[in-house]
Image: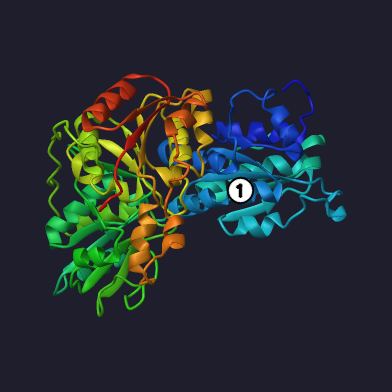
Amino acid sequence: MSNPTPNGAQSLIRTLVDSGVEVCFANPGTSEMHFVAALDDVPGMRAVLGLFEGVATGAADGYARIAGKPACTLLHLGPGLGNGLANLHNARRAHTPMVNIVGDHATYHKRYDAPLESDIDAVAGTVSSWVHRSMTPDAVPTDGARAVAEAMRAPGGVATLILPADVCWLDSTPPAEPITPQPAAIVPDEVIVAAARALQSDGDSVLFLGGRTLDERGQRAAVRIAAATGAKVFGEVFPRIQRRGAGLPVVERLTYLAEFAQMQIGDATSMVLVDAPAPASFFAYPGKPSSLVPEGCAVSTLATGTDDPVAALEALADALGAPEDVALAEASRTEPPTGELTVETVAASLGALMPENAIIVDEAQTSGIFNQGATGGAPAHDWLTLTGGAIGIGVPLSLGAAIAAPDRPVINLQADGSAMYTLQGWWSQAREGANVTTVIYNNSSYAILRMELARVGAEEAGPKALSMLDLHGPDLDFVDLAQGMGVTAERAETAEQFTEALERALAHDGPNVIEAIVPPLGM
């Protein structure tokens, strides 16, 4: 540090770097200027600018899901936090470790109720597992170390540290030593025994996986358990990350549509939950049940929260004497498609061309219905999804994933309407040289809302209602939008054009956008 006595901001950044936090996704304002200045004083912290706070929070989520450790954000007061809230909600549902730094007015300035004054603590509490406000510059380093430890505490969470401006500019104490996060707990033997009994009971049983269990170890253990008990194994609808593809265990996810999810679960009489809540319908629908658990089905929990769910699955498999060898997905490729460009032919191109160890960021909505089936035998890859249902995550999540793993190709499967929420992330991808290929499904509609309009039993839609679900007039030109932010882009209108465009994009370093002109599903 150039200053022998560090200020609060300098000491905080040094503490974060020493604790393993190496990237800051930022959209700063006046209150955060001393933190911004300190980025040049402290080596080891990469700073990534987002032009909207939702880009910063979504990118920090994507980074942590791939890196397995937190990044930090830097947001400007309560309104900045509010702008980033949707993707903080998604991160909360994903149990993503994140250090969420929110600047505030100087401690002595708050009483004047300046225009940007707000209740940051209350807003942060809606999405954070831990919220703390540093009140003195000497407290900042220890508060920073604690924030990292709290973010990493099982099962992972958003740790929000609120930093008044004066605690950043005043002289502080030296950086704090890293704090070792509390380790995940080992599930007691009696819980393992109870889960084994539940899965071996009369009737059909279901092992329901979520959270941290959909990596290779967790899925392998789950498939072993299924082989020993005959249980069905399902993953949650929108997992934080699932390892899948050739040479890996096959775990089917529950579908988004409640009616189909109920068919998957069937008449199960016993369900064991592992790092997941009991399955429920995404929304309430007139005359339909909210719970997807069959009536009379006994529900128990193997592991959740602060437990180690993967270790619990492995212990359960061993207790059952489950076979070590399990069926794995065979390598297979779809044939490159020809003819009309549809969501089905886009999926076939993806299955034909997916590179080794890719990262797939899926916010395709209704347009992604064929993607899982087309890629099940593709080279092993990671699949990231919209955990909290708050759309606008795909572009920033891809940015963060690419920064966490610059040697891996990232493919963002992106619905057109959702893309518009955080399109500024393309500018950040271009600035950082992020290796992201974005496939925009341009069907010029909120197709999922058209479907939901019918499912909720709303009266027949008139022209005003339908105009709320339509993206025509004016038409969105994603090629122009991407190129205006420095991203290479092209449009595909046939299956052959799309396959050729995808080949070019995957061979090209840096961000690319392919605008796929497709009809809405079912229309």
Of 494 and 275, nearer the camera is 494
The answer to whether residue 213 is left or right of residue 90 is: left
Res 119 → quadrant: bottom right
The answer to whether residue 229 is left or right of residue 122 is: left
Q: Position of residue 154 (x, y in %)?
A: 46, 52
Image quadrant in which the N terminus is located? top right
Q: Is residue 218 above or below residue 31?
A: below
Res 316 → quadrant: bottom left
Residue at 18% from the left image edge and 57% from the top image edge: 225
Residue at 81% from the left image edge and 45% from the top image edge: 106
| Residue 281 visible from this viewpoint | no
- Which color scheme did the rendering employ for the protein? rainbow
Q: Position of residue 194 (x, y in %)?
A: 26, 69
Q: Is residue 450 above or below residue 158?
A: below
The type of residue carrying mark 1 is Asn
Q: Position of residue 496 (x, y in %)?
A: 21, 28
Q: Position of residue 16 (x, y in %)?
A: 61, 35
The answer to whether residue 41 is left or right of residue 239 is: right
Q: Indicate the secondary structure of the residue bearing disc 1.
A: helix
Of 330 and 337, nearer the camera is 337
Residue on which the image places disc 1:
83
| Residue 247 visible from this viewpoint | yes
